[in-house]
Amino acid sequence: MVQFIDTRTGDVTGLAFSDVIIKGIAASGGLYVLATLPTVSKQEIRELIPMTYAQRAAFVYKKLELDIDDETIDAIAQASYGDQFDDKRIACVKNIDKRTHVLELWHGPTSAFKDMALQCMPRFFSAALNKKRTAGEQSDDMLILVATSGDTGKAALQGFADRKGCRIAVLYPENGVSQIQRKQMVTQKGDNVAVYGVRGNFDDCQNTVKAVFNDKAFNERLHERKSLRLSSANSINFGRLMPQIVYYFSAVADLLASGELNEGEPLDICVPTGNFGNILGAFYAKRMGAPIGRLICASNENKILTDFISTGTYDISHRSFIKTPSPSMDILISSNLERLLFHLADGERVARWMGELDENKKFTVDKETFAAIRTLLSADYVTNEESLEALSRIWKEHRYLCDPHTAVAWEVGERLRTPGAPLLIVSTAHWAKFATDVLRALSDIPAGQPLTGAYATHTEFEQLDDIVALTRNVSPVPVGLANLSHARERFSSSIDAGASSLENVLEAL
């Protein structure tokens, strides 16, 4: 049975997967990482080729030696990756040319890559909770707290809605998501869900959630008065991160099957990156044996990760938060970077760096760690205008319609790919979630500039029809998004950032 380490102490905690997925975050404020990673052999990767995606997922989960029985793992995988996806391949590899491929991770019910984890994670969460209750170790219900920059919120709400023994509260920046992303969240059905707009940006949402987790007095009151305990569904929870390893192995299997990847040939992967969880999944897959070459980190104008990977200094002390066409990447504090730093350094240094970030808003890694980062990662960023120009160019040259996040990854991937090597561009959301900026790109209107003509008066939902007409329906609007405009809004509350505001509304639940 695999065990977990606390990134800020370096100690093997003695906790199993069931403990970690329920706790979410370590007592030190650190994150949980696997004490050891399994190895997947070349033969095992070949054996993935004829499997369904659900079977591939179950294979990876069993390799991780979770304290969940194989029969339950198989059932969870089958239920997670089924008819709720609009393509039976689940994580689809689209071949653009012989050396360039797109991994489409948005075929799930909320049209974003977060479905890949959040159709699965709540089921594992329930299995772990049942296991604890059967053993007499858990009686409280769980309150899942989620900070979202747009897509995680809806996917988490969808996954946990009406799930027994759980409640879920989602915080989003009220002026920092697209109209469609907001509508997806505030119309969510379920008796156990709550949604709050935050007067601030994503980092304010994330810091608020972390502060509440670290408030011991509030957690005690929540337990005593409400019989509730806190957990998370952000990728700070290893249960959220774990399913993100699977689709990299799946993509390799598909490329081997099609002959687009030769056995043993390294595959460069470019990921549009905000909170660092998606690219960390690729790092874990690489460490486990997937033939992954260069890991390319693509940023928008909030280029904190590009600057860190280039200099070794993580500095938010004088950095402004910029609104971009790719809002799910509008993040300055990339929580999962802590996990990578632990794997490249140790708990003592990670604790010191995270303390410096809290106190001074910056830290600098040592030369040894910086050299390891530079060996592992490449990074670049794309301006707002460049992202829409890339989206337009991709459409014109390849007749492939993508969202702004994918356009960022595509542009950076083309810049930094290994010459002649295969490149996998990770596509994280369906274009229809960002209609206004997609329409700007197709109309050659610069980022931030108003739409013109009839488009100027259209709602974001009407703009979906405009895009379908312009592109001759090359990529239809998913049913769930097409029907969203008529859905009843259930949540309209706004709160200030900060633990006290969130604690007040949670105690009133």
Image: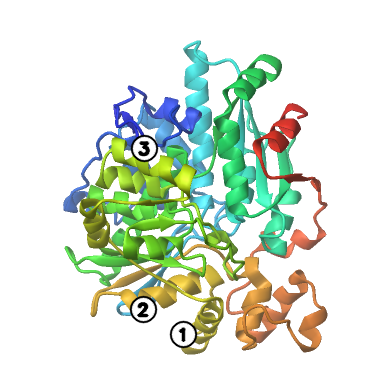
Kind of residue at disc 3: Ala
**Is 384 situated above or below 80?**
below
Between the C-alphas of marks 3 and 2, the distance is 36 Å
Which residue bears the numbered disc 1? 398
Q: Which mark is residue 414?
A: 2
Q: Quadrant of residue 163?
A: top right
Question: Is residue 218 or residue 123 the one in the foreground?
Answer: 218
Question: Is residue 79 or residue 65 the one in the foreground?
Answer: 65
Q: Position of residue 395 (x, y in %)?
A: 52, 84
Q: Give the mark, 3 or 2, whose residue is nearer the N terminus.
A: 3
> Does the rendering let one see residue 342?
yes
Judged left or right of residue 392, residue 492 is right
Which residue bears the numbered disc 3? 351
Mark 2 residue crowding within 10 angstroms, few (<14) / some (14–19) / many (20+): some
Kind of residue at disc 2: Glu
Judged left or right of residue 457, residue 299 is left
> Does the rendering let one see residue 86?
no
**Measuring 49% from the left and 56% from the top, which residue is drawn there?**
316
Mark 3 residue crowding within 10 angstroms, few (<14) / some (14–19) / many (20+): many
Kind of residue at disc 1: His
**Is 326 situated above or below 49?**
below
Between the C-alphas of marks 1 and 3, the distance is 46 Å
Q: Tell which tag, 2 or 1, sits nearer the viewer.
A: 2
**Element type where label 2 sits in the image:** helix
Q: Position of residue 413 (x, y in %)?
A: 37, 73
Q: Give the mark, 2 or 1, whose residue is nearer the N terminus.
A: 1
Q: Give the mark, 1 or 3, whose residue is nearer the N terminus.
A: 3
**Measuring 30% from the left and 74% from the top, which residue is drawn there?**
417
Q: Tell which tag, 3 or 2, sits nearer the viewer.
A: 3
Question: Is residue 97 or residue 283 the one in the foreground?
Answer: 283
Q: Position of residue 31 (x, y in %)?
A: 41, 37
